[in-house]
Image: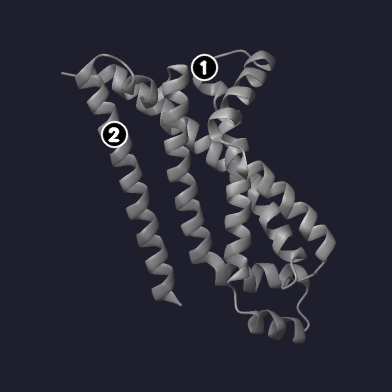
Amino acid sequence: MPNLIVLTSAAGQTLYMTFISTLLACLVGFPLGLGLFTLSPTGIRPCRNAYKRTSCIIRLFRSVPFIILMILLFRVFRFIAPGETWTSVIAPLTISAIPFVTQTVENAFARVNLNIIHAARAMGSTDFQIVKKVLIPEALSGLISGLTLTIINLLGYSAAAGALWGCGLGGLIIQSNVPLTAAAGVIILLLIESVQILGALATRNIAISK
């Protein structure tokens, strides 16, 4: 039988890493994605040159393999702020997720019908009012889908980081204790499936309410 105390502790570490890194990535990625959409050719305040430069930087960061980013950033933050291994993993998890969140947010806003934006502009709405009353409500289902994918990706990333640095559920998967490894794998799969179900339900409810 797997050790329930060890499993509970590892699951708590994984959930903590995933939650904090998701929160931080969204706090940074949402305004970046909104800014990218605003500057895009179909955005609120188009600026082609600024859009190209910013989107190029975002794509560059997203193209870096996670394992390389994880090793480099983990060592840097481990040196700057030594502490528990699983807390040091949060910084590289967050930084790796920011480009994904940014592009997800931009794509969600880009799918909003331009005629609605133009109509709001014609009625004298300010940029802030367009974002608050048009863009976010219209793109909400896409934003939730993007959040769901972000959490799922970070659960997978946290498992990989845990296997690499020996923390969380990922740290249990590489152990020689077969029951413990199997239980950790099942918990990760259940967490991912739960997030997918909740995300799908939320997206469906928003679509029905429109």
Residue positioned 31% across, 17% down in the render:
6
Instruction: Determine the residue positioned at 30% across, 22% down.
Output: 7
Outermost residue, left side: 1
Q: Which mark is residue 187?
A: 2
Element at label 1: helix
Count neighbours of disc 1 (C-alpha within 10 A) and say few if under 14, some if 14 to 19, many if 20 or more: some
Instruction: Name which residue type carries label 1.
Output: Thr
Q: Residue at x 57, y 13 (%)?
A: 83
On residue 162, the disc is none
Q: Which mark is residue 85?
A: 1
Do the residues bearing badges 1 and 2 touch, measured as CB atoms within 8 Å? no
- Mark 1 and mark 2: Cα distance apart in space: 21 Å
Question: How far from the left and from the top, in percent, is residue 84?
Answer: 53, 15
Residue drawn at the location 26% of the way across and 22% of the way down: 181
Q: Residues within 10 Å of mark 2 (few under 14, many from 20)?
A: some
Q: Secondary structure at mark 2?
A: helix
Q: Looking at the image, is 149 positioned above or below residue 167?
A: below
